[in-house]
Image: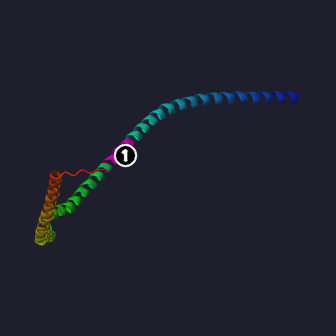
């Protein structure tokens, strides 16, 4: 029997420990639920603030980068414009002051024109006597041809004056 009482006492202690443990678990769960609710309330609020701040900072960074890009582009444009003005400005003045034609080119052109006029004049001087001789030769040939025509006409008239019949 002692054994039995001891067994029952152990059984009772185990049940009491189980009850106390279950009671403690229930209380702990309730506390955890409250802790989770508090954490959710605090953390959700904190997360909202953190996300809002992170987005604001990200937007600021984007705007800052864009401002830096605009500044850099503007600086490059200003520097490039100034550089081109420096190089082109000098070139423009150089070209504007040297708009006259090259004197050597003009001298060569006038020399070529003078040579062409001299060639034409020389040709005419040489050609005129040849043309005159050609005119004389053609005039002589024309007179000879005219004499031949007159002979042919004279022969035709003579045939008309003396009709000859050919019997065949």
Q: Quadrant of residue 91?
A: bottom left
Q: Which SS does the magenta portion mostly show?
A: helix
Instruction: Quadrant for the N terminus, please.
Output: top right
Magenta highlight on residue 66 = yes
What x and y, as percent, mark residue 46? 45, 36
Given residues 76 and 21, the one toward you in this image is: 76
Magenta highlight on residue 14 = no
Task: Quickly name the residue at label 1.
Answer: 61
What x and y, as percent, mark residue 100? 12, 65
Q: Residue at x 14, y 53 (%)?
A: 157
Q: How is the image coloured?
A: rainbow
The relative height of residue 164 versus residue 91 in the rendered view (above or below) is above
Magenta range is 58-68
Q: Residue at x 23, y 60 (%)?
A: 83
What x and y, as percent, mark residue 61? 37, 46
Count of numbered badges drawn on the protein: 1
Graded by Cα atoms within 10 Å as few (under 14), some (14 to 19) or many (20 or more), the crowding at tag 1 reads few
Residue furthest out toward the right:
1
Q: Is residue 17 left or right of residue 154?
A: right
Q: Is residue 93 left or right of residue 7?
A: left
Given residues 38 and 155, the one toward you in this image is: 155
Given residues 50 and 98, the one toward you in this image is: 98
What x and y, as percent, mark residue 106? 13, 68
Residue furthest out toward the front:
167
Q: Quadrant of residue 33?
A: top right
State the SS at label 1: helix
Q: Quadrant of residue 96?
A: bottom left
Q: Residue at x 17, y 63 (%)?
A: 90
Q: Is residue 57 left or right of residue 36?
A: left
The relative height of residue 130 versus residue 82 in the rendered view (above or below) is below
């Amino acid at each position: 029997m002692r054994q039995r009482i001891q067994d029952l006492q152990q059984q009772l202690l185990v049940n009491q420990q189980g009850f106390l443990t279950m009671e403690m678990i229930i209380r702990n769960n309730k506390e955890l639920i409250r802790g989770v609710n508090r954490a959710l309330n605090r953390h959700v609020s904190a997360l909202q603030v953190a996300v809002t701040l992170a987005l604001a900072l990200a937007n600021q960074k984007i705007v800052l980068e864009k401002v830096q890009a605009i500044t850099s582009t503007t600086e490059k444009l200003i520097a490039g414009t100034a550089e081109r003005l420096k190089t082109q400005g000098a070139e423009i003045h150089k070209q504007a002051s040297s708009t006259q034609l090259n004197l050597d080119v003009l001298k060569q052109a006038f020399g070529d024109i003078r040579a062409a006029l001299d060639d034409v004049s020389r040709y005419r001087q040489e050609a005129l006597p040849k043309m005159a001789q050609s005119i004389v030769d053609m005039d002589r040939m024309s007179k000879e041809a005219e004499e031949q025509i007159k002979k042919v006409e004279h022969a035709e008239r003579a045939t008309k004056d003396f009709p000859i019949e050919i019997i065949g």
